[in-house]
Structure formats: structure tokens, C-alpha cells
Image: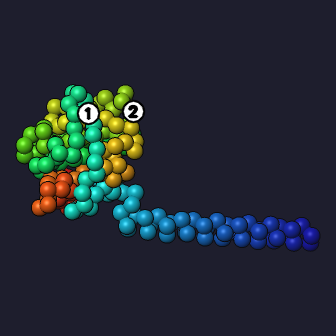
Amino acid sequence: MPLLVTAVVVVGLLGALNLILTLGVVKRLREHNTLLSSGAGVAGSGGLEVGEEVGVFTAVDVTGRPLDRRALAEDTFVAFVSPSCASCAEKLPELVAHATAAPGGRDRVLAVVVGDRVEAEAFVAELAPVSRVVVEAPGGELSRAFRATNYPTMLWVAADGQGRIARVKKRSEVPA
């Protein structure tokens, strides 16, 4: 009889532990659902909203040409990608095709490869013929200026009515 009582107590304790762990998982799923529905943590989200001004930055592209936000005065397509992002690698051919077809040619397309220079070489090789390319470390100056924290992030910028360089098109107007 004592063995049966012990077994029932152990099974009861395991059931209670299982219930506590399940409630913890449900809580985390609700938190993730809230994040996903707000757009945080989703590839392609993040960055400036339409009408928001691009922050101040200076950079040098892979060819050695200086770049600042004044270079973005006319419609410019800007893409942030990372070699450590599986979705970025998957969408790279679409990005290259879009950059090739972009009005104004490679001077109206800016690709920012976020990551280690050695890892970025394959992305740079694909993007350099069709866009200006800047390689920067995570949290770099361009990422801060565009508030790009997720990859890929793609947007159009240009001078607005007040002469500010700002995001000018919605996410639905850039390739997914």
C-alpha cells in the first residue's frame, strides 16, 4: 500500500509540474503573438515609417565613394540585408532583380550588408553590379539612421515637400 501511495504522489507532482510548465509556455506564446502582430521581430519590418526622416549618417561604399543622406535626395531604394539571415540569402536573387530594374540605375539603389566583411563578400559580389553597397557592423551608422534592426528591411526614400530625406513608400510597394 505505501508503494501505491508513493506512486500516486509522484504522478500528482509530475502532473503539477507539467501544468506549471505548460502555463509558462502559453504565457511565452502570448508574448510572441503580441510581438508578431505588432510587426516587431518580423523580417522586413522595422525601419522608418512613411514620412519619417532619415537620420544623419556618413559612410563609404565598397568602391570608396563617400555617402551621406544628401545622396538620397531623389527616389532611392534602400535594402538592409545580413549574411547571417537565411531569409536574406533566399531573397537575394529577388533583390538583385529589383535593383536591376529600379529607375535611375545603381546610383538610386543602396544595399547595406550588415555583418562581418568576410561573410559579406558573397552578398557584395551579387549586389555591387546593380547598387551602391556599404558593409557595416551590426548597429552601425546606417542601421541607426534608418532604424533598421531586422533583416531584410527594404524601403524607398527621397526628399519630401520640406526637403527632408524621408521614407516615401509603404512596405507593400517594395519587393517582399
- Residue type at numbered disc 2: Asp
| Left or right: 2 in relation to 68 | right
- The residue shown at (25%, 53%) is 54
Q: Position of residue 40 (x, y in %)?
A: 39, 60
Q: Position of residue 134 (x, y in %)?
A: 27, 36
Q: Is residue 35 visible?
A: yes
Nearest the eye: 112 or 25: 112
Chain-order first, disc 1 or disc 2 = 1
Residue furthest to the left in view is 104
| Left or right: 60 in relation to 82 | left
- Residue type at numbered disc 1: Val
Specify the label residue 60 is tagged with: 1
- The residue shown at (18%, 56%) is 164
Q: Residues within 10 Å of mark 2 (few under 14, many from 20)?
A: some
**Which quarter of the rendered picture does the N terminus lie within?**
bottom right
- The residue shown at (36%, 30%) is 117
Color theme of the render: rainbow
Q: How many marks?
A: 2
Q: Quote the CA–CA distance across marks 1 and 2.
A: 16 Å
Residue furthest to the right in view is 2
In the displayed structure, would residue 157 be above or below residue 29? above
- The residue shown at (33%, 46%) is 143
Residue furthest to the front in view is 162
Nearest the eye: 163 or 115: 163
Q: Position of residue 49 (x, y in %)?
A: 26, 61
**Which quarter of the rendered picture does the C terminus lie within?**
bottom left
Q: Is residue 88 visible?
A: no
Nearest the eye: 77 or 18: 77
Residue labelled with disc 2: 116
Which image quadrant for residue 173? bottom left
